Amino acid sequence: MRRCRRRGIAAVLSLALLASAAPGVAATRGRLLVLRADGVQLWFDVELALDAESRRVGLMWRTQLAPRHGMWFDFESALPVTMWMKNTPVPLDMFFVATDGTIAAIHAHAEPYSLDTIMAPRPVRYVLELAAGSAAAHELGVGDRALLVAGDTTGAQRIDGRSETLQ
């Protein structure tokens, strides 16, 4: 009886915590390193959209996005990805990223609240969303590489299962 009561209390607390989270807020965070073609390394703090629900919600209902902060969507395999801006009040730059981390395309200044679909030009595994203007401000382009990592700029380690060394 006690064990069942403890499990019930734990379940209620878990549900309360889930219910108290703001819509669209991903619980998991990471650091993203973008290696520009000219050798410049840029770091971004990202929320991770790793499951269907967090990918569906994305950055909806956010009224602001801090500089060098965004969301990293992982679709688990290369797919013909489409995005939209439903319920998203802040304009975004969307980076469509191939399985190897290469930025395949950039859609700059996605229109807030738009229901228009924004399609990757080819199947991609990842999408990075940053505040509109980030691509231009940081001189990010197609061919640059985005690597999701754990740690800070020293001793960074990959968390996506690949063994590539970061320098």
Image (cartoon, rainbow, N blue to C red):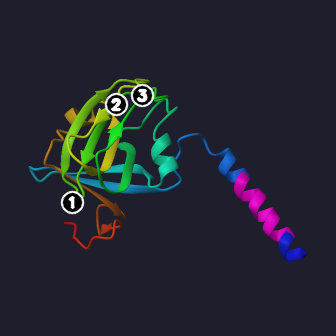
Q: Position of residue 147 (x, y in %)?
A: 27, 58
Name the kind of residue labelled 1 in the image.
Answer: Asp
**Tag 2 or tag 3, which sits nearer the N-term?**
3
Rendered image quadrant of residue 166: bottom left
x then y, percent, for residue 115:
41, 25
Q: Quadrant of the N terminus?
A: bottom right
Q: Which mark is residue 154?
A: none
Disc number lying in front (2 or 1): 2
Q: Position of residue 107 (x, y in %)?
A: 25, 33
Task: From the viewer's perspective, tell me whether residue 9 is left or right of residue 62.
Answer: right
Which sits earlier in the primary sequence, circle 1 or circle 3?
Answer: 3
- Residue at the disc numbered 2: 117
Examine the structure image and report whether residue 1 is included in the region drawn in magenta.
no
* Earlier sequence position, callout 2 versus callout 1: 1
The answer for how far apart the CA atoms under marks 3 and 2 are is 16 Å
Using the image, tell me which numbered label, if any, was put on residue 90. 3
Residue 11 spot, x, y in % from top left: 75, 61
Residue type at mark 2 is Thr
Q: Which residues are magenta?
A: 5-15
Q: Which residue is mark 1?
A: 100
Label 1 vs label 3, nearer the camera: 1
User: Which element is circle 2 on?
Assistant: loop
Give the prevailing secondary structure in the magenta stretch. helix
- Kindly state the secondary structure of the residue where label 1 is placed: loop
Label 3 SS: loop
Which residue is located at x 46 percent, y 29 percent?
86
Inter-mark Cα distance, 2 to 1:
24 Å
